Image (spheres, coloured by chain):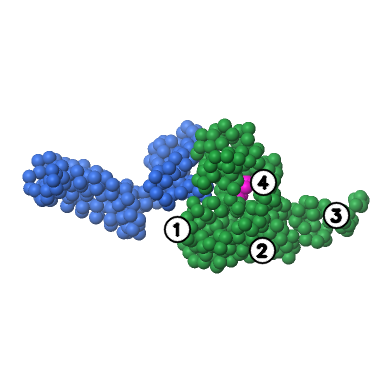
Chain colours: A blue, B green
Amino acid sequence: MAAVAVGGFVGPLLLVALGVVLPAVLAGVIGQLARLTLLLSLPIAISAVLVNVFFFPGGETVLLRLGPITATAEGLVFALEILVRILAISGAITLFYLTTRPAELVVDLERRGVSPRVAFVASASVQTVPAMVERAGQITAAQRARGLDTEGSAWRRVRGIVPIVGPVILGAIGEVEERTMALEARGFTRPGRRTLLWWPPDSAWERVLRWAVALAVPVLIVARVAGWLTWLP
Amino acid sequence: MTELVAEELVHVYREGGVRALDGVSLRIGAGERVALIGQNGSGKTTLVRHLNGLLRPTSGRVLVDGADAATLTVAQLARTVGLVFQDPDRQIFAPSVRDEVEFGPRNVGLAGAELRAAVANALAATGLAEAASVNPYDLGGSRRKLLALAGVLAMRTPVLVLDEPTTGQDARGVERVRALIDEAHRSGRTVLTVSHDMRFVAETADRVIVMRQGRVVLDGTPAEAFGPDAWEVLRSTHVEPPLPARVGHRLGLASIATDASLLDALREGAPGAGERPQ
């Protein structure tokens, strides 16, 4: 959110360096973060850059002509601004995913008074992706063992989508039902507050940092609206 | 007739760096009926997934009928080695039982009358002929497991690998799986079963291979593998010999592994056999 508020591309880049890259280095997940962020953002980043560089409305400084389409400097600058925002958003989401244990997230949300149902939905969302990837891997192996050719031509690969995606979706639906019953059986829907036996440690400097980040966002929005950040390219 | 050979097979999983296979060498001859046993994580499933190329060795090699499996795709190997996975719900996708069974044989090139015959035989053998038009998800868990088995049986592969075929089966289901293995054996197919059900292993295998921590620690007949001399090895991989082997040992009988052999030994004059308890 701060990266969008700041404007330009130097400000968001600084925010990415301070808010995403530095914590990722400290947490020892920078390699995974780089890979996953690229995977997440590459398709949308490529299309955003191409569209803005070649079709930016009002672009006057011509950099390159390719038949009827023209790349402009104004389009390139705008594309860079979009690019760093995409990197900031996908980087922040990936960092959260890589450094947050679902169980700790649920406990902490409940400790702060969030309903167990809402906390569970948050946790399930974080857990769903790796579980689906693991399930898809096993299903692919089972179908390949029955002769499904996933290494052949593009057409053969397309033909392989239904036998793989079908069980992934059916299994996920079945799992939701099983999980719901297992939760019910353990009194999940019982009304009232829960007694927590444990919650994640939350040191004083972590609290200070969190509040600082929370305050920085409205401050940056005000600064942007007031025109105090025009010196940043 | 297909022979399977593993030579100094090593497999290290990228995630976690676990050395799941640590120099496995073995030869399974054509038409053999083999059981692979050992504790969870001993490398059984990793080993069988090398036989059809789903996993590739970190070092060493697998030969399927003399051909290096590394030079063949999984789709090519699937024509020779049919692998039935433990969890049927991780493969069923078709709208009917018949369509589900047809998937594998179609992939390996069966068509027309040959395909129809293979599917009909597999459905009959698994007791699913009457359910051919039913949606697979309307079957119970035990029958879905038999459906997964039918899907691979219909591929008519010379090698059949079954991963935990009796898990979740009631006595009737276990009996049906046992009959399927016997039939596959009689028709000359090689059958390799991964199982934790020692009674089933003793009664369906001619050869038992015991694995521990990625290595083969015992390889012999059921009588050898479940005999008292092997118990120390079995204990080290958390495998309990079948009841007849333990009862036979307590009665001072020769090494036996099945209910039938225990009864035979008792009839032939075990100490106290035939006497009424006082």
Q: Distance between the residues labelled 3 and 4?
A: 29 Å
Instruction: Give the residue displayed 44% in from the left and 40% down from the top.
Output: A162
**What is the magenta range?**
B162-167
Q: In this view, does B235 lie to the left or right of A112?
A: right
Q: How far apart are marks 2 and 3 (CA)?
A: 27 Å
Question: Of helix, strand and loop, which one carries label 3?
Answer: helix
- Residue type at tag 2: Asp
Question: Of helix, strand and loop, which one carries label 2?
Answer: strand
- Residue type at tag 3: Leu
Instruction: Give the residue displayed 31% in from the left and 55% down from the top.
Output: A34
Give the quadrant of residue B98: top right
Q: Distance between the residues labelled 1 and 3?
A: 52 Å
| Residue, disc 3 | B266
For marks 2 and 3, give the one nearer the viewer: 2
| Residue, disc 4 | B180
Q: How crowded is mark 3: few (under 14 residues within 10 Å), some or many (20 or more)?
A: some
Q: Do the residues labelled 2 and 4 touch (CB within 8 Å)?
A: no
- Residue type at tag 1: Glu
Q: Is residue B164 magenta?
A: yes
> Do badges 4 and 1 share one subunit?
yes
For marks 3 and 4, give the one nearer the viewer: 4
The residue closer to the viewer here, B185 or B229, is: B185
Q: Position of residue A186 (x, y in %)?
A: 54, 38
